[in-house]
Image (cartoon, rainbow, N blue to C red):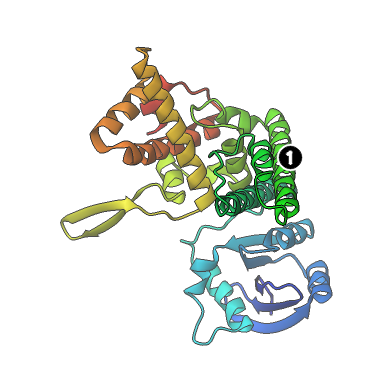
Amino acid sequence: MTISVVGVDLSKSVFQISLADAKHHVVDRKRLSRTQFHRFLAQTEPVRLVMEACGTSNHWGRTAQSLGHEVKLLHANYVKAYVRRTKTDAADADALILADSDKSLHPIPVKPEEQQALQGLHKIREQWKRARVARICEARALLAEFGISTPAGVRGIGRKLTLVTEQAPMLIQPTLLDLIQEIGELEQRLKRVDQALAAYANSNPDVQALLGIQGIGITIATAFVARVSSIHMFKRGRSFSSWLGLTCREYSSGQTRRLGRITRQGDRYLRTMLIHGARAALMAARRKAANGKELTRLETWAVNTQARVGHNKATVALANKMARIMWAVWTRHDTFNGNDALRFAA
């Protein structure tokens, strides 16, 4: 029996595989160790490997591709629907075989090492940023217990905290100084990550194209390039915006159509970053309007939308339009200016 499809349930050390023919009939099942699985990939004739897009899936996908296999990564939430009865490793592997037969499920491209490393930079940056905020809040809370008030904001917070720490009791001063030193170390780490992102942005044409959009900076542009394996997976800007969770949730039946709030599906980090960028662009447009400067068509639309529906809704609406503009700029590598908003965001 010729094996055409192999469903692989990944793990750290144990790999459950289901072998199927061209009609997706499971003919054999195996449980392999890490070494045995690598040997299986090297000795097996080229087949289509179906795996969930999860931890280590990109590594094994690249390994399988280098050995001549076709790799298909599927979203775990979509594969879950094909698990029958009790959930086991064997059932998960069989579910991947069934999911492969569903042509409506869009596969996720395997990320190259450089793109995965760029995404890793953003994950580390976000963790360090949260750790810095936690340390700052802890230092402020401890000082507040002794009646010592500290100013808000993170700019120069280490120096400010060092000055007011001298007013705290002697017992806690050394520990507070260690905490403040840790805040400074986290700030230096964040600066080094930002420098690495800036260096990458200078050498990547996709990032340079996205930087031409108002509200899109180096951090946002590199985050999207790191997360989106191929922008050409999306046929239109609306599909890209929907993937980010920025389109309206729909409750429709028969002749009645109801549109609710945004779906909030997809990558939360990308959606949050884009909304922050839209908020900055909206504030910049408001300042231009207040100073009597000429606005572009996109800025005019954003300011009018804010006056009509409020600041927060206008920010999300602008983020939705910016996502569509990003898709157009990214796919065409064209230069964007605010007067082309309707053509780019179609």
Residue 51 coordinates in the image, percent (x, y): 63, 67
User: For the point 42% across and 22% down, which residue is it?
Assistant: 338
Q: Is residue 20 above or below residue 230?
A: below
| Quarter of the rendering occupied by the C terminus | top left
**Amino acid residing under circle 1:** Gln
Q: Is residue 95 above or below residue 245?
A: below
Residue 165 visible within the image: yes
User: For the point 46% across and 48% down, which residue is it?
Assistant: 244
**Disc count in the image?**
1
Q: Secondary structure at mark 1?
A: helix
User: For the point 38% across and 35% down, which residue is it?
Assistant: 318
Residue 93 coordinates in the image, percent (x, y): 61, 77
Task: Examine the image and state in which quarter residue 221 appears.
Answer: top right
Task: Examine the image and state in which quarter residue 254 appears.
Answer: bottom left
Residue 79 coordinates in the image, percent (x, y): 52, 70
The residue nearer to you, when weighing 201 against 103, is 201
User: For the point 63% across and 45% down, which residue is it?
Assistant: 226
| Left-right relation of 220 to 265 | right
Q: Residue extending furthest left?
A: 255
The residue nearer to you, when weighing 260 against 195, is 195
Residue 101 visible within the image: no
Residue 217 coordinates in the image, percent (x, y): 57, 31
Q: Which residue is mark 1?
A: 188
